[in-house]
């Protein structure tokens, strides 16, 4: 057992639960699967919560407890400690960096959408702007954050937690307004009947499954904060249990709320892009509040997105300037300016986002661009999540090399490995299936266009990480010859 933490300032375990919850799942996450599956997603949520999210949360708890201390830095540390291989640690860190890029672009594009709702008050952005202009503005937002990283981040750090709390409040307002609507004779758009719940299985269903994993992943993000708890071995498991139950309650209740507002068989085509704003607009107008509720949500969402962009850019720059990066990346990439910022790393990040944004700009509509970004996220993020289960398998295969751990998910070795392999294979298969485009009719030019874009982008994001160590090796050899 580790000794009780003696720090003067501690983080409460409930506070940590809420902090990670805000990071793991956002209000709009249940909207995406609802468009793909209709009310059948309620069954899928329950199945995934019991047979995937629950073991995932407890696996992350065991990993965090086992590596608590110097190895609490996350998956990169877990892989390095479990395998004793720095290169694998670098590869894991690179994967984490690579999967932040599409999410960074997604957040920046969502900023444009959010501003459009504040200004226009409706979903007409696609009619007023071309995809290429939309892409340019998205890149401009990222570029501005990269240029003013210090100033912007310092300004938004103070608001990031409060905006997260405000988003939770807006979620509670959503639930409250749904109850109010039903108690005042509101119409239920999709009733809880077998006809509405039964699945219509197709290839599209399976290619979209990673969307659920993407929405629920991130429990391992609590690990770096273990040392800030007063009694980590006892409080960290409580943190993760609360995280699981709050997440489960949120996705189930919100899905039921969406069923009240939207007919699952006639979902608007731009639901992933505008659904959350439209939901608050409907509720506000029904309550006689006009667009005020939608405007409040739009502003909260905008501030939250800006804080996320700052955090993502900061996280990316930290990895590119880490000790592992120094060992496996060319020195020119890590060059710092007079202010100590890795300027070339910022240029590299900007260039990487530009490649993806230009590709997205070739799609016919803004809605296609937003949906494609979500598709990319449902590929790269689950691949990253699969590494969590790989870390768990490494831990349990080599359990004798680690000290005693107070929290053990499944004490039986074979049972633990079976669950670890189940979660790993499900995540990996779903991520691979997600290469099949989730938008557009199978076999059409639009479908094939997005398919090759998916393949090119994923190979570009992950493949670059393999090229950089080779460049570093060549650089070292060149210096030795000189």
Image (cartoon, grey):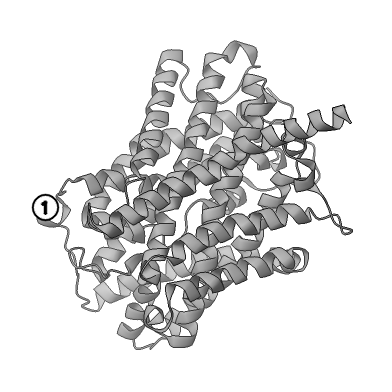
User: Residue pushed farthest top?
Assistant: 400
The residue to which callout 1 is attached is: 194
Front residue of 135/235: it is 135
Q: Does residue 239 appear in this view?
A: no
Q: Position of residue 161 (x, y in %)?
A: 63, 62
Q: Is 478 placed left or right of 129 in the picture? A: right
Secondary structure, mark 1, is helix
* Quadrant of image for the N terminus: top right
Front residue of 7/427: it is 427
Indicate the quadrant where residue 404 lies. top right
User: Residue pushed farthest front?
Assistant: 482
Compared to residue 175, the image places residue 454 above or below, namely above
* Quadrant of image for the C terminus: top right
Front residue of 378/393: it is 378
Q: Is 97 placed left or right of 209 in the picture? A: right
Q: Does residue 395 appear in this view?
A: yes
Residue density around tag 1, few if under 14, some if 14–19, many if 20 or more, within 10 Å: few
Q: Position of residue 231 (x, y in %)?
A: 68, 35
């Amino acid at each position: 057992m580790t000794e009780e933490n003696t720090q003067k300032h501690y983080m409460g375990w409930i506070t940590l639960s809420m902090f990670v919850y805000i990071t793991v799942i956002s209000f709009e996450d249940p909207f995406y699967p609802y468009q793909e599956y209709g009310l059948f997603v309620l069954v899928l949520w329950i199945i995934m919560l019991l047979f995937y999210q629950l073991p995932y949360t407890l696996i992350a708890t065991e990993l965090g407890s086992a590596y608590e201390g110097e190895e609490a830095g996350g998956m990169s540390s877990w892989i390095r400690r479990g395998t004793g291989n720095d290169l694998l640690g670098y590869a894991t860190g690179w994967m984490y960096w690579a999967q932040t890029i599409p999410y960074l672009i997604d957040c920046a594009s969502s900023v444009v959408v959010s501003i459009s709702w504040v200004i226009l008050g409706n979903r007409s952005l696609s009619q007023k702007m071309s995809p290429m202009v939309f892409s340019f503005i998205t890149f401009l937002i990222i570029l501005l954050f990269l240029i003013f990283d210090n100033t912007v981040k310092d300004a938004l750090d103070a608001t990031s937690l409060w905006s997260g709390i405000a988003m939770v409040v807006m979620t509670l307002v959503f639930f409250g307004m749904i109850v109010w609507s039903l108690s005042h004779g509101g119409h239920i758009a999709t009733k809880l009947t077998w006809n509405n719940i039964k699945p219509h299985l197709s290839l599209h269903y399976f290619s979209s499954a990673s969307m659920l994993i993407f929405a629920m992943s991130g429990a391992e993000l609590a690990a770096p904060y273990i040392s800030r708890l007063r009694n980590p071995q006892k409080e960290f498991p409580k943190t993760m249990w609360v995280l699981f139950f709050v997440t489960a309650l949120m996705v189930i209740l919100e899905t039921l709320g969406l069923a009240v507002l939207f007919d699952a068989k006639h979902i608007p085509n731009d639901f992933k892009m505008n659904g959350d704003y439209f939901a608050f607009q409907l509720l506000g107008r029904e309550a006689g509040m006009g667009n005020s509720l939608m405007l409040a949500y739009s502003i909260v969402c905008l501030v939250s997105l800006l804080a996320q962009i700052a955090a993502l850019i900061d996280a990316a720059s930290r990895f590119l300037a880490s000790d592992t990066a120094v060992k496996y990346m060319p020195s020119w990439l890590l060059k710092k300016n007079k202010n100590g910022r890795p300027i070339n790393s910022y240029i590299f990040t900007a260039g990487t986002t530009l490649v993806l944004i230009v590709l997205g700009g070739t799609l016919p509509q803004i809605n296609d661009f937003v949906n494609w970004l979500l598709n990319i996220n449902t590929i790269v993020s689950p691949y990253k999540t699969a590494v969590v289960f790989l870390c768990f398998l490494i831990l349990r295969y080599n359990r004798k090399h680690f000290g005693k751990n107070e929290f053990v998910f499944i004490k039986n070795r074979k049972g633990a490995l079976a669950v670890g392999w189940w979660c790993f294979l499900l995540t990996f298969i779903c991520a691979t299936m997600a290469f099949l485009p989730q938008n557009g009719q199978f076999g059409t030019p639009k479908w094939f266009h997005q398919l090759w874009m998916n393949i090119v982008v994923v190979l570009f994001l992950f493949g670059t990480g393999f090229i950089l160590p080779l460049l570093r090796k060549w650089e070292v050899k060149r210096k030795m010859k000189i």
